[in-house]
Image (cartoon, helix red, strand yellow):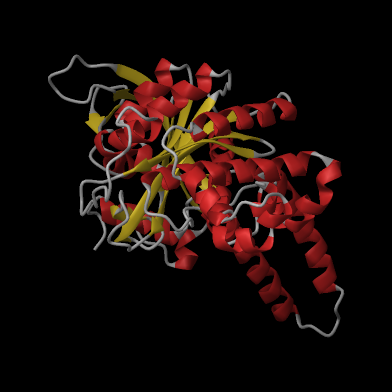
């Protein structure tokens, strides 16, 4: 039943077109199932993902990835709807924010867990009480209201490790680059590779002086960029110390980390602003700049998951005002994605795999794509130069345009695009 649900917009459409092929039940039966408070959808998704990862075999790079996404919803009687900042639009919207946690390897991204986060701003309360306050959904609602995002992430990591899903790295963007998150990764022997905000967080140099990211950029990075071979970036890395104590009253807990400052090649030609550089942090100071960026690029898999979930997998599309249905929806979306990955791994399901070829294309390893680009560029250059009717200047224009499009894609993957960088600068008050 999950299979035939994949490309259907609503339960009503599913009930009209496909349900009668399997059962005499109608859509009310499905809604009754979604509205149940005692079903552990999270456990079902986690163990399905575990089996999928086991089928993949040993991977060279294994990483946990976390990110959030906002589904805009304006219903005034929908419990759990609140105001959230939408990273894509750069403004606050009313809706439901889903915190998603997954496993990324060099071949695929597998969603492991999901949680709804309810902010304290304009939060809409329950329209009806739970039948049992001790039920699974009732407890999760209380956690969605009371827990912070770092606490939710810590719980997700603990559950994944508890069922035997292992990873070496933990990847997240700058919205999750906090001291509690870094402490949690060290507790579980994970190497954190994070995008960092250019805020007031202090880093200690070898001479014991403490500087913010902006101050380090001015004194240690500016004018000292180094080109990365085969990548459209320049970097400058510094090994510093970071105090994980959250307040001055607590005993200092200094750890060694590596900071990698990164920007696009020749930014002056594109009129880049003074804030158009990014900062990455690795808790393993021995990793090279190239390796840090290569591993962080695996975070792109969760962005592909969000896009696929919203466009094709019924992400929070169920027409219900039961909070239980929202919990079921976010996990059913993850289950459907896992089914598509299963089809990708098995030839006997090639027809379904072909129908979702966008997913397969998007999950290609970025390092492999980067290496191929050098070959493609040479082939395109030979093809253009063989057209004698084109003047030399026009050939160069075509090649430059193609090169800019590819570079733009990699910038988006690494969150090095101008919009993302300036949103970060605005969030720290550094950009007008």
- Residue 255 vs 42, above or below: the answer is above
Q: Nearer the viewer, residue 22 or 353?
A: 22
* Residue at the spot 54% in from the left edge and 39% down from the top edge: 293
| Residue 248 position by quadrant | top left
* Residue at the spot 47% in from the left edge and 66% down from the top edge: 270
Q: Nearer the viewer, residue 35 or 103?
A: 35
Q: Position of residue 109 (x, y in %)?
A: 61, 39
With 390 as the anchor, is 61 left or right in this view?
left
Whether residue 56 is visible to the viewer of this picture, yes or no, is yes
Whether residue 285 is visible to the viewer of this picture, yes or no, is no
Query: Given the current orientation, which residue lies at the most extreme left position?
Result: 249
Query: Given the current orientation, which residue lies at the most extreme bottom position?
Result: 389
Query: Given the current orientation, which residue lies at the most extreme top position?
Result: 251
* Residue at the spot 52% in from the left edge and 19% down from the top edge: 161
With 372 as the anchor, is 61 left or right in this view?
left
Q: Position of residue 324 (x, y in %)?
A: 41, 43
With 249 as the anchor, is 34 left or right in this view?
right
Q: Nearer the viewer, residue 38 or 139?
A: 38
| Residue 237 position by quadrant | top left
* Position of the C terminus by quadrant: bottom left
- Residue 298 vs 203, above or below: the answer is below
- Image label count: 0
Q: Nearer the viewer, residue 113 or 221?
A: 113
Q: Position of residue 52 (x, y in %)?
A: 68, 31
């Amino acid at each position: 039943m999950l299979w035939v649900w994949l490309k259907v917009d609503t339960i009503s459409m599913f009930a009209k077109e496909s349900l009668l092929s399997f059962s005499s039940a109608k859509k009310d039966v499905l809604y009754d199932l979604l509205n149940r408070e005692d079903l552990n959808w999270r456990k079902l998704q986690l163990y399905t993902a575990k089996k999928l990862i086991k089928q993949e075999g040993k991977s060279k790079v294994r990483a946990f990835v976390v990110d959030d996404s906002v589904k805009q919803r304006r219903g005034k009687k929908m419990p759990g709807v609140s105001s959230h900042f939408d990273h894509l639009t750069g403004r606050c919207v009313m809706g439901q924010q889903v915190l998603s946690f997954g496993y990324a390897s060099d071949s695929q991204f597998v969603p492991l867990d999901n949680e709804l986060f309810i902010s304290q701003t304009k939060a809409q309360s329950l329209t009806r009480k739970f039948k049992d306050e001790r039920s699974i959904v009732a407890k999760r609602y209380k956690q969605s209201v009371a827990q912070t995002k770092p606490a939710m992430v810590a719980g997700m990591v603990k559950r994944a490790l508890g069922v035997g899903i292992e990873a070496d790295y933990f990847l997240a963007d700058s919205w999750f680059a906090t001291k509690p998150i870094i402490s949690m990764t060290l507790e579980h022997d994970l190497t954190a590779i994070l995008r960092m905000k250019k805020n007031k967080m202090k880093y200690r140099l070898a001479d014991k002086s403490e500087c913010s990211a902006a101050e380090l950029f001015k004194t240690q990075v500016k004018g000292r960029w180094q080109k990365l071979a085969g990548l459209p970036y320049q970097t400058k890395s510094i090994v510093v110390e970071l105090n994980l104590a959250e307040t001055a009253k607590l005993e200092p807990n200094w750890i060694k980390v590596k900071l990698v400052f990164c920007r696009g090649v020749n930014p002056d030609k594109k009129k880049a602003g003074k804030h158009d550089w990014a900062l990455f942090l690795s808790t393993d100071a021995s990793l090279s700049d190239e390796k840090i960026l290569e591993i962080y690029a695996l975070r792109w898999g969760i962005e592909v998951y969000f896009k696929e979930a919203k466009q094709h997998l019924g992400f929070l599309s169920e027409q219900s005002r039961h909070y239980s249905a929202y919990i079921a929806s976010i996990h059913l979306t993850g289950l459907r994605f896992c089914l598509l990955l299963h089809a990708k791994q098995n030839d006997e399901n090639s027809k379904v795999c072909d129908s979702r070829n966008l997913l397969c294309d998007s999950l290609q390893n970025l390092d492999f794509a980067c290496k191929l680009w050098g070959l493609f560029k040479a082939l395109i250059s030979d093809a253009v130069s063989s057209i004698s009717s084109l003047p030399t200047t026009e050939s160069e224009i075509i090649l430059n345009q193609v090169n800019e499009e590819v570079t733009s894609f990699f910038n988006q993957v690494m969150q090095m695009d101008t919009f993302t960088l300036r949103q970060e600068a605005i969030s720290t008050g550094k950009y007008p």
